């Protein structure tokens, strides 16, 4: 039997802001190992959850963990940006009462527990294939991007998570090394990145990890996908329904914050533009500053340290 080691991030805050109610229908945009879905289903015995994930192995783990809830939970292989299509396929014509988008990979994916051998998400992945794709069937992988992207494209990719002076060193080193031997495993990529970033001293490991994050974001088109996912969730919500986004790095924080504020409506363009066109107000933002995990949670689960919770209510 699968041993579930996944710990859901910010469970108390998710419950407080999602406000599950009896008979409500909720969307879990990243099923993972089923932790947040379980939280909703246990909290409101009459509630229903529709949970999606791009990784079929994660859906298997969620199915085991949520089996006790029977037909109150529906699992589908999809991305959160496909929410409206999923609801159509289920013939669910009514709106939903809440949506949660949990960004980034799960610890099970990072640790390689999902398929026996991991897919290269972690800098400690050794000789795993360097894929980093949540959907194992997609053709775009980390190895293919490193082999095919131009210098300018690589600069844009790593510029999302690395500092200015680091980007050039990393890109030059990758271009040099891929001409000698394909960069096809985490072991090789970690050596290449460490060589490029070793001047950072004790901080080198963190900077290598940041480069991995930039590559993973590109493989899965995560930032544009998050924008589309927020749009889809807001479109599906009932009036008074809530959307929550758990983000884990600067790029995700910015997209979640900016997108939700954009959906609040208001003037298009500079605030001083009197009489200009205005966006329709679709949500009311509930977290002007994103919430951080408590000190107690960070002690229990150090991986939660970078998490931020954004919440808004459909108007």
Image (tube, rainbow, N blue to C red):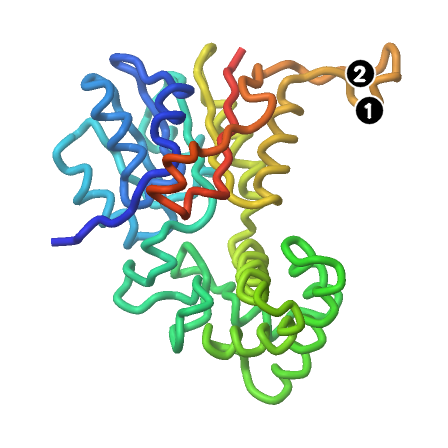
Q: How far apart are the alpha carbons under marks 1 and 2?
A: 8 Å
Image point (71%, 70%), residue name: 150
Q: How many marks?
A: 2
Place of residue 20 in the rendered image (x, y in percent of width and height, measured from the top left): 32, 17
Q: Which mark is residue 66?
A: none
Image point (61%, 78%), residue name: 195
Q: Within the image, what quadrant is residue 79 found in?
A: top left
Q: Is residue 305 shown above or below 281?
A: below
Query: From the image, which quarter does the C terminus lie in?
Result: top right
Place of residue 115 in the rendered image (x, y in percent of width and height, measured from the top left): 28, 63
Would you say 37 lies left or right of 205 here? left
Label 1 residue SS:
loop
**Which tag is nearer the camera, tag 1 or tag 2?**
1
Name the residue that disc number 2 marks.
277
Would you say 170 lies left or right of 249 here? right
Instruction: Find the residue positioned furthest to the bottom.
Output: 180
Place of residue 42 in the rendered image (x, y in percent of width and height, measured from the top left): 21, 25
Image point (17%, 29%), residue name: 71
Place of residue 140 in the rendered image (x, y in percent of width and height, measured from the top left): 51, 63
Would you say 1 lies left or right of 271 here? left
Name the residue that disc number 1 marks.
269
Q: Badge 1, how many Cα within 10 Å: few under 14, some, many 20+?
A: few
């Amino acid at each position: 039997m699968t041993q579930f080691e996944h710990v859901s991030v910010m469970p108390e805050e998710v419950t407080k802001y999602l406000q599950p109610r009896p008979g409500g229908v909720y969307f879990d945009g990243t099923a993972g190992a089923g932790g947040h879905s379980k939280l909703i289903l246990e909290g409101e015995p009459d509630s229903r959850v529709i949970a999606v994930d791009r990784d079929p192995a994660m859906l298997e783990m969620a199915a085991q963990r949520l089996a006790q809830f029977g037909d109150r939970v529906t699992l589908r292989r999809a991305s959160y940006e496909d929410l409206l299509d999923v609801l159509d396929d289920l013939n669910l014509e009514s709106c939903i009462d809440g949506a949660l988008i949990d960004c980034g990979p799960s610890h099970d994916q990072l640790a390689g527990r999902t398929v026996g051998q991991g897919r290269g998400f972690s800098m400690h992945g050794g000789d795993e294939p360097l894929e980093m794709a949540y959907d194992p069937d997609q053709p775009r992988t980390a190895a293919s991007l490193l082999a095919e992207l131009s210098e300018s494209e690589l600069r844009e990719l790593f510029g999302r998570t690395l500092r200015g002076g680091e980007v050039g060193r990393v890109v030059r080193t990758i271009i040099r090394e891929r001409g000698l031997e394909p960069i096809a495993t985490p072991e090789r990529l970690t050596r290449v990145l460490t060589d490029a970033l070793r001047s950072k001293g004790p901080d080198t490991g963190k900077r290598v990890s940041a480069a991995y994050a930039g590559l993973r974001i590109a493989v899965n088109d995560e930032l544009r996908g998050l924008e589309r996912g927020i749009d889809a969730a807001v479109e599906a919500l009932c009036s008074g329904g809530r959307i929550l986004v758990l983000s884990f790095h600067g790029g995700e924080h910015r997209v979640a914050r900016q997108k939700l504020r954009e959906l609040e409506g208001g003037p298009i363009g500079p605030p001083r533009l009197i009489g200009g066109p205005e966006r329709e107000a679709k949500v009311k933002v509930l977290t002007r500053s994103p919430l951080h995990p408590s000190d107690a949670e960070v002690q229990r689960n150090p991986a939660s340290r970078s998490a931020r919770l954004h919440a808004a209510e459909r108007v």
